Image (tube, rainbow, N blue to C red):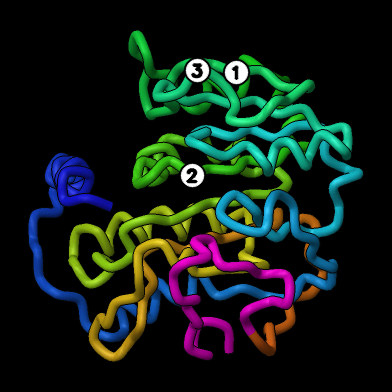
């Protein structure tokens, strides 16, 4: 996340009355890690998408999924391409491109960016979702967000009733190297706490694009891919014994892999 994007978050926090920039203590950082800590939900994971950036680990329940919503397209659509083999229709949106990066046959594309509000080239996340399917159909949906830092604005705006219906979330969290900054820590904890009301992390993977950073006594990747499952589908959570998963792959092949310390999952 660039400092320009962080400044956007700063303005939001100023609006909310949070204006201090003190460095966070260890407990505040640990609170963030705890909200991201993955659990074994008793459902096997599969890899969907290519073996580099754009591939993710999901619970093996895709036969129960009809739709995937993907705000942020960029230069890869291998994930949505792979979902087509399960009969899953993808809804994509991205102002910066003219369509999917790969040839898809079962999709809808909007040349707009997903945001918290409506404007000429922007559409509110709730309006976008409900313009495609009915609320009751979201329980057969994946929401996959990779929007280079704007995920926080989107997730803050996402209606809780809509959020509670979505079966699987896949979110790339950017800018985690700023987790020690008070106002960003506030936003991050608020967003993660909201998500955890309805979904639990079942897999995390550090994207090796942007390095890992020392924050107090913790090692924090700049970008973290998180797969979350609706709590309605989880009967019992068990700790994950080891990461990375055997299905994990480096996002950027020419760069060193990032390995998470065991406090991320134990």
Considering only order in the chain, which callout, 1 or 3, is on the residue closer to the N terminus? 3
Asked whether disc 2 touches disc 3, contact meaning CB atoms under 8 Å apart, the reply is no
User: How many callouts does the rendering have?
Assistant: 3
Considering only order in the chain, which callout, 2 or 1, is on the residue closer to the N terminus? 1
Residue 130 in the image: above or below residue 143: above
Secondary structure mostly taken by the magenta-highlighted segment of the chain: loop
**Residue at image point 49% right, 28% down:** 125
Residue 5 lies within the magenta run: no
**Residue at image point 67% right, 67% down:** 202
SS at badge 2: loop
Residue 96 appears anywhere in the view: yes
Question: x and y percent of residue 214 in the render?
Answer: 27, 82
Question: x and y percent of residue 104 in the render?
Answer: 73, 25
Could you give the CA–CA distance between mark 2 and mark 3, rounded to whole angstroms?
17 Å
Marking on residue 146:
2
Could you give the CA–CA distance between mark 1 and mark 2, rounded to whole angstroms?
16 Å
Residue 15 falls in which quadrant of the image? top left
Would residue 216 appear left or right of 262 to someone viewing this image?
Answer: left
Q: In the image shown, does 70 or 54 lie closer to the viewer? A: 54
**Labels 3, 1: front one:** 3
Marking on residue 109:
1
SS at badge 1: strand
- Which quarter of the image is occupied by the C terminus? bottom right
Question: x and y percent of residue 262 in the render?
Answer: 53, 90
**Residue at image point 47% right, 25% down:** 94
Which residues fall within the magenta stretch? Answer: 243-266
**Labels 2, 3: front one:** 3
Asked whether disc 3 touches disc 1, contact meaning CB atoms under 8 Å apart, the reply is no
Marking on residue 83:
none
**Residue ID for mark 3:** 98
Residue 91 falls in which quadrant of the image? top right
Question: x and y percent of residue 236 in the render?
Answer: 79, 74
């Amino acid at each position: 996340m660039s400092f320009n994007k962080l400044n956007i978050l700063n303005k939001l926090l100023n609006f909310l009355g949070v204006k201090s920039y003190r460095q966070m203590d260890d407990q505040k950082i640990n609170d963030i890690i705890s909200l991201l800590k993955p659990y074994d939900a008793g459902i096997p994971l599969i890899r969907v998408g290519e073996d580099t950036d754009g591939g993710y680990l999901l619970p093996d329940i895709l036969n129960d999924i009809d739709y995937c919503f993907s705000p942020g397209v960029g230069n890869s659509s291998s994930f949505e391409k792979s979902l087509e083999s399960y009969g899953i229709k993808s809804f994509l949106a991205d102002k910066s491109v003219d369509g999917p990066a790969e040839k898809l046959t079962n999709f809808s594309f909007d040349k707009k960016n997903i945001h918290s509000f409506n404007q000429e080239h922007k559409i509110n996340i709730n309006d976008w979702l409900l313009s495609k399917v009915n609320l009751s159909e979201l329980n057969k949906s994946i929401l996959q967000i990779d929007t280079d830092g704007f995920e926080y604005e989107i997730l803050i705006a996402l209606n809780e009733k809509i959020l509670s219906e979505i079966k699987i979330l896949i979110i790339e969290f950017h800018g985690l190297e700023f987790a020690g900054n008070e106002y960003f820590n506030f936003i991050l904890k608020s967003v993660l706490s909201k998500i955890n009301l309805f979904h639990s992390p079942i897999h995390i993977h550090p994207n090796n694009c942007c390095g890992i950073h020392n924050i107090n006594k913790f090692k924090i990747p700049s970008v973290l891919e998180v797969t979350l499952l609706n709590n309605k589908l989880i009967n019992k959570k068990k700790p994950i014994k080891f990461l990375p998963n055997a299905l994990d792959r480096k996002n950027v092949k020419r760069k060193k892999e990032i390995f998470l310390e065991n406090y991320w999952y134990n």
